[in-house]
């Protein structure tokens, strides 16, 4: 979208199952009270990912994303936010990695060109805790209950959406295409699914 439109993307953290312990929970445990058909849900998600050209793995667990969100704020400050968010997406949804673990997060920081030592200090000091707390409060004030949610002004669109839907959302809200854009209809390499934008 950023290649095609004159937009600035701002990621926002969302409290997605913050009660999840560090070791994670099985999907059966997570959805036990909702009596969900987990294989059908995963098949739908894989279908959406396939349609958008996104990588997708076989997910059996859910993990707490709080520390990954804090580290994402730091990565954004370092100019590596998009790269880090993409690395977390791939680690979690493709590789099934526990993104609550410090060693996993330090490895992801390293893969996107961030200092592992500095990343460790950020995690140990929890220096971006307040920034994530503020995002969580913002989502509550704005009635955000699902991810991804794409917000533009006072309008929002909820859920993983095809490129064309997001393009229409931007155009209907007065966002201009870039003059130098020659990539109309281009499908992006990845769309985040664990953040509010």
Image (tube, grey):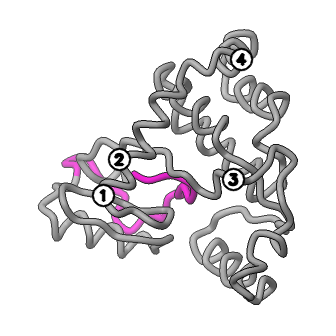
Q: Earlier in the sequence, mark 3 or mark 4?
A: 3
Specify the label residue 138 is tagged with.
Answer: 2
For the residues carrying marks 1 and 3, which lies nearer the camera in this image?
Answer: 3
For the residues carrying marks 2 and 3, which lies nearer the camera in this image?
Answer: 3
Callout 2–callout 1 Cβ contact below 8 Å: yes
Q: Which residue is drawn at the image coordinates 74% and 76% (left, top)?
A: 31
Q: Which residue is drawn at the image coordinates 26% and 69% (left, top)?
A: 169
Callout 3–callout 4 Cβ contact below 8 Å: no
Q: Quadrant of residue 37?
A: bottom right
- Magenta segment, which residues? 178-197
6 and 152: which is toward the camera:
152
Q: Which residue is mark 3?
A: 19
CA separation in Å, label 2 and label 3: 19 Å
Give the farthest residue toward the left.
174
CA separation in Å, label 1 and label 3: 21 Å
Where is residue 2? Give x, y as percent: 36, 48
Where is residue 43? Give x, y as percent: 74, 83
CA separation in Å, label 2 and label 1: 6 Å
């Amino acid at each position: 979208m950023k290649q095609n439109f004159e937009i600035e993307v701002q990621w926002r953290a969302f409290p997605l199952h913050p009660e999840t312990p560090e070791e994670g929970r099985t999907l059966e445990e997570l959805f036990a009270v909702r009596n969900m058909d987990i294989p059908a849900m995963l098949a739908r998600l894989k279908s959406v990912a396939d349609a958008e050209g996104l990588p997708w793995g076989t997910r059996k667990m859910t993990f707490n994303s709080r520390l990954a969100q804090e580290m994402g704020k730091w990565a954004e400050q370092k100019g590596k936010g998009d790269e880090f968010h993409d690395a977390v997406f791939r680690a979690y949804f493709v590789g099934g990695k526990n993104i609550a673990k410090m060693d996993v997060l330090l490895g992801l920081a390293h893969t996107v060109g961030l200092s592992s030592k500095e990343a460790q200090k950020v995690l140990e000091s929890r220096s971006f805790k307040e920034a994530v707390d503020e995002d969580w409060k913002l989502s509550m004030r704005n009635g955000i209950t699902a991810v991804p949610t794409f917000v533009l002004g006072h309008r929002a669109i909820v859920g993983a959406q095809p490129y064309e839907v997001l393009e229409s959302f931007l155009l209907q809200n007065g966002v201009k295409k870039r003059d130098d854009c020659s990539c109309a209809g281009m499908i992006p390499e990845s769309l985040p699914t664990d953040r509010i934008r």
